[in-house]
Amino acid sequence: MKTSFEEQIHAAVREGYGAIAQTNQSCCSGASCCGSSPEVAHDLAVKLGYDPQILESLPEGTNLGLSCGNPQAIAALNSGETVLDLGSGAGFDVFLSAQAVGPTGKAIGVDMTSQMLSKARKNAISFTERTGLSNVDFRLGEIEHLPVADASVDVVISNCVLNLSPDKPQVWREIARVLKPGGRVAISDLALLRPLPEGATELVNALVGCVAGASLVETIERDARAAGLAEVKIGIKHNYVAVMEDVGDSLYQQILSLLPPGQKMSDYIVSTDLSARRAIEPCENDWHHEQQPSGNGPGGGDEARLTSENPQWHQSSSCCGASETGCC
């Protein structure tokens, strides 16, 4: 029985990241986002802008060196918000988000690798002991089919994960679906300035190492806008590739050998910080605006309503996501 391309990609990613979760070692023997030693992982996180003091608050084994940016720096998280991390791994950015939103907020992590999920849930016990916070939730699922209710999240973050998906437009549609109207996106990922040589895209460890599956910058912006997101901004940073070259990462050295003479990795691959919002669209004839406040009931966005099989007022145009168009 033949497997689809999407299934093959998912299988390769599960295998690679499952091995990282079990061994805490890199799948490609370097500091790229397929993992690294604790020492190199810490050094990389600091170079990417994470606060060394905050890193010390994390449980041991949380930072696996899988980052290619710092979504925390662009998320501007507020107390009480609900944050969703796509491809949450061992919980690195989830635990940082949980501290930022505080006890009245919530940080949710979704990962499709059962070994990573198990590791994250064990780390959550240590996290609660260290901080007194119990506001994290780790769920098994694919980022193309998020186990999260419609319009239930204030902020979606991700760190070097979207490039692993074989169906990136679907991921962006899912991001738009789970965000509340006006909700924010803060994603760090690798992107391409130009297509990689054919030999590089065929490397299995280049896929798991977040390189072979990277999209062109203009494609990322197009997919985000097509999903209904607005205010899409992509900041390009060359420093991540420079760090990989400095530490002699084996994957990057291998890809470099496949490039035409005289060309550098940074001519092709960059780290990006993407920010966006789910649009808030005015609705015509929206009588609920005047008669119902936000919160529980017809004017609110409670999860029970969204998951109800036959909500009495699902077809209304009430505020904060009650309508099928999501306008407000």
Image (cartoon, grey):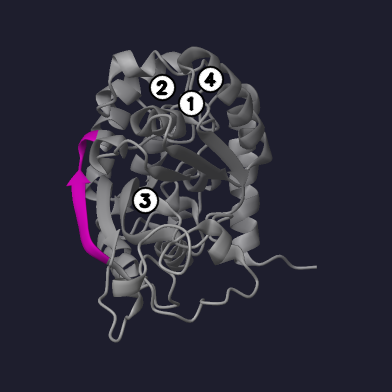
Secondary-structure class at tag 4: helix
Observer-nearest residue: 19 or 195? 19
How packed mark 3 is, by other alpha carbons closer than 10 Å (few <14, some 14-19, many 20 or more), is many
- Amino acid type, callout 2: Ala
Q: CA distance from mark 3 to mark 4?
A: 23 Å
Q: Earlier in the sequence, mark 1 or mark 4?
A: 1
- Amino acid type, callout 1: Leu
Image position of 161 with respect to 194: above or below = above
Disc 3 + disc 4, Cβ < 8 Å: no
User: Which residue is tagged 1?
Assistant: 64
* Residue 139 position within the rendered picture, expressed as x and y whole percent measured from the top left: 60, 44
User: Which residue is tagged 3?
Assistant: 154
Quarter of the rendering containing residue 72: top left
Q: CA distance from mark 1 to mark 3?
A: 26 Å
* Residue 148 position within the rendered picture, expressed as x and y whole percent measured from the top left: 54, 55
User: Which residue is tagged 2?
Assistant: 41
* Residue 191 position within the rendered picture, expressed as x and y whole percent measured from the top left: 31, 52
Secondary-structure class at tag 2: helix
User: Which residue is tagged 4?
Assistant: 128
Q: Residue at image x 45%, y 59%?
A: 178
Q: Residue at image x 61%, y 34%?
A: 116
Q: Earlier in the sequence, mark 1 or mark 3?
A: 1
Observer-nearest residue: 324 or 170? 324
